[in-house]
């Protein structure tokens, strides 16, 4: 039996969505890592609950796109998140943006684990965790909800897991759990109401049997828990 490791990227979800997400975590009696994008009072509740370790989820996309509105450096972006989560030792970048320069800044700011390498668990790939020259541990992951929703290989991914050497790290987003997203069109339609809760909730997938949605995704992986 293989252990499953759950990670969640906050992605600026509203407090209402985060409250729903955290209630689900508690009701299911599971633990994991939440990668934080912004400060919110619910983080205090999550800290007290002890179920979710808090990491950071820096966004460097504006720097990559040369957005003139982004005046912060990569170092400032990371330090701002560390001010919110001082004890964070893990990180995953938004859009999985990484580099040796970014990794060095992460390490200098107390991050010891990063997970920016996504791999499909193909039988031909022997993927393992590894430490770099600084001592930063790189942890690959094989499942991300939005990639799964865009994939045409949904029914074949599980057959590779027995030969997958790396830890079984899953990554979810609170917004997809809240919407119970079963396809990207649902999310894209709801996205404009990301922080307008009363309208956002009208886009939820209410199929009682899941309908392939993210809220019930764990049922297909129960044998690995």
Image (cartoon, grey):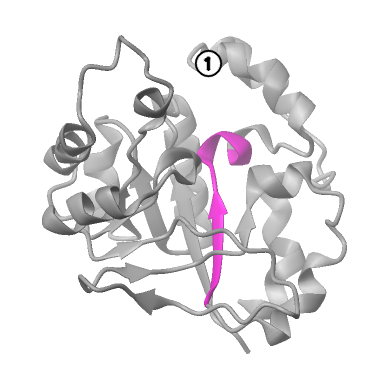
Horizontal side, residue 35 vs residue 145: left or right: left
Vertical relation: 137 (above or below) 97: below
Percent position of residue 176, x then y? 62, 37
Percent position of residue 210, x then y? 79, 46
The front one of 196 and 59 is 59
Residue at image point 37% right, 19% down = 66
Percent position of residue 42, x then y? 30, 36
Vertical relation: 88 (above or below) 69: below
Percent position of residue 24, x then y? 52, 48
**Residue on which disc 1 sits:** 197
Horizontal side, residue 91 vs residue 158: left or right: left
Residue at image point 68% right, 46% down = 147
Q: Quadrant of the N terminus?
A: bottom right
Does the magenta portion include 171?
A: yes
Vertical relation: 124 (above or below) 80: below
| Quarter of the image where one finds residue 171 | bottom right
Does the magenta portion include 126?
A: no
The front one of 220 and 125 is 125
The front one of 49 and 108 is 108
Residue at image point 52% right, 39% down = 174
| Quarter of the image where one finds residue 129 | bottom left
**What range is drawn magenta here?**
167-177
Circle 1 packing at 10 Å, graded few (<14), some (14-19), many (20+), is few
């Amino acid at each position: 039996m293989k252990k499953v490791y759950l990670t969640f990227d906050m992605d600026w979800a509203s407090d209402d969505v985060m409250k729903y997400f955290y209630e689900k975590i508690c009701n299911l009696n599971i633990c994991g890592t939440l990668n934080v994008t912004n400060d919110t009072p619910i983080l205090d509740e999550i800290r007290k609950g002890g179920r979710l370790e808090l990491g950071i989820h820096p966004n460097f996309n504006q720097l990559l796109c040369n957005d003139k509105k982004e005046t912060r450096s990569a170092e400032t972006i990371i330090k701002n998140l560390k001010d919110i989560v001082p004890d964070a030792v893990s990180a995953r970048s938004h859009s999985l943006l990484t580099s040796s320069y970014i990794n060095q800044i992460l390490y200098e700011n107390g991050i010891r684990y990063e997970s920016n390498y996504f791999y499909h668990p193909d039988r031909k790939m022997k993927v393992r965790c590894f430490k770099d020259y600084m001592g930063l541990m790189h942890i690959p992951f094989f499942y991300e909800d939005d990639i799964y929703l865009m994939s045409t290989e949904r029914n074949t991914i599980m057959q590779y897991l027995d030969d997958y050497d790396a830890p079984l790290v899953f990554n979810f987003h609170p917004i997809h759990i809240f919407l119970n997203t079963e396809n990207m069109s649902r999310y894209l339609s709801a996205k404009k109401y990301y922080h307008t809760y009363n309208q956002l909730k009208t886009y939820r997938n209410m199929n009682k049997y899941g309908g392939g949605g993210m809220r019930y995704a764990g049922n297909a992986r129960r044998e690995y828990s």
